[in-house]
Image (cartoon, coloured by chain):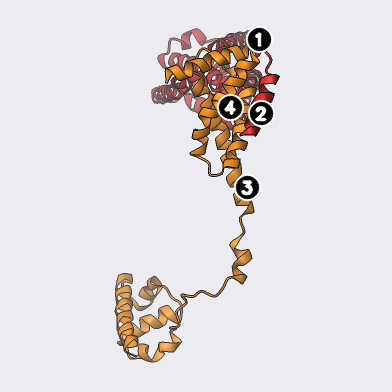
Amino acid sequence: MSKIQDLVETLSQDAAVARPAPHPFIMSMKWLAGMTIYLALSLAIYGLRPDLMSKLHEPWFAAEIAVLIVIFVATSFSAALLSFPDLHQMRRVAYAPALMFALFLLVIFFSWSADNPPAALPIHTYECTTCIVLVSLLPAAWTFLEMRKNASTHFRLAGGIALLSALSIGALWLRLHEVNDSIKHVIEWHYLPMIGFGILGMWLGKKILKW
Amino acid sequence: MTEKTEPLEALMKQAINGDKRAYAVLLQETSRFLRPFLAKRLNMAAELDDLMQEILISIHKARHTYDGERPFKPWAYAIARYRLQDHLRLHYSDQLRQAIDLSDVENSLPDPVTKSAVTYESIRGEIRALPQKQAAILKMMHQEGYTAKEVAKKIGMKESAVKVAAYRAYKILRNKLERL
């Protein structure tokens, strides 16, 4: 017991004024604002797809974009909450992305069913995955750096969600930039690799967020 | 419950603002309410003290993630659980590393005391006296090393029939050997 008393004494003498971490909603709003500006800039540099306005009138394309935005928002909130030891006592919000992913799968399934006759596959393949990853690098680095300042007790999940949040920006960028109507290609080279990167995010979470 | 936790939130708020006395009281209170939680999950008192120290240091490191606006105990328990899992993971991986491989000691183990003294060779005569089919089945299974399935295939019987025949043969042999 005396060891504990000594430690309490030492720690309390060491305690200076601590600046509390920002509220997770403030954190995520900052990310949302920053990444929206980043997305807008990237699209301004590389250009929007010329047929975007007409594509947005297609219900499943519009739904896909809307759900991607919802995933981006939900994963941002979730990543911020997961960077706190107790998830800021908002467990349901922290796990909300699971629902959004289910909704996303549903939308993709209906888009696939509606793609009849199937649109022509583009010539390129892995280039799309590479583009998504490259565009997502900066948001991912920023998110991880910010999360590292806190103390996550769910570091694997936090890492996976943070990377998916960043990748959703890359995926949004590509869907709004690339002229491509093949949902099969989009599933194969945009969204399936994202799942793989989500797993990589869990590994990164262990390496970067464990304390 | 609320009466107990309220002062902790207030203490933590004061501690974040640099009140050393409040912080000392808070850490003492924290170690007091965490002790039974850890004691239930650990066997040794020394281990408990080591882990408690780790938890208090972690609480100190992570104190900026607590704003004093939400209940303190769930926050402290989250950190305690996290450190406990880490501690148990390390503990068990250490135990696995130190575990002795069975193959290293099997040469020094005594001979099995339950080893049967009855072998196929020692009761060859009794087996020959069995009905021809049963004797053939036991020969193939216990002298030539075939499985029941392989015997069934060889002699064109069902596997279950081979097992039944073997069982009947064992029964006859047991009766005979008990009379000896």
Observer-nearest of B28 and B91: B28
Instruction: Give the chain ID for the orange colour.
Output: B
Marks 2 and 3, how far apart at CA: 26 Å
- Viewer-nearest of labels 2 and 3? 2
Residue at 63% x, 64% y: name it: B104
Marks 3 and 1, how far apart at CA: 54 Å
Name the subunit of mark 1.
A
- Viewer-nearest of labels 2 and 4? 2
Mark 1 touches mark 4? (CB < 8 Å): no
At mark 3, the secondary structure is helix
Task: Give the residue at mark 4.
Answer: A159
Q: Do dots 3 and 1 share one subunit? A: no
- Amino acid type indicated by mark 3: Asp
Labels 2 and 4: the sequence-earlier one: 2
Mark 3 surroundings: few (<14), some (14-19) or many (≥20) residues within 10 A: few
The answer to whether one can see residue B52 in this image is yes
Task: Give the residue at mark 2.
Answer: A7
Labels 1 and 4: the sequence-earlier one: 1
Q: Which mark is residue B94?
A: 3
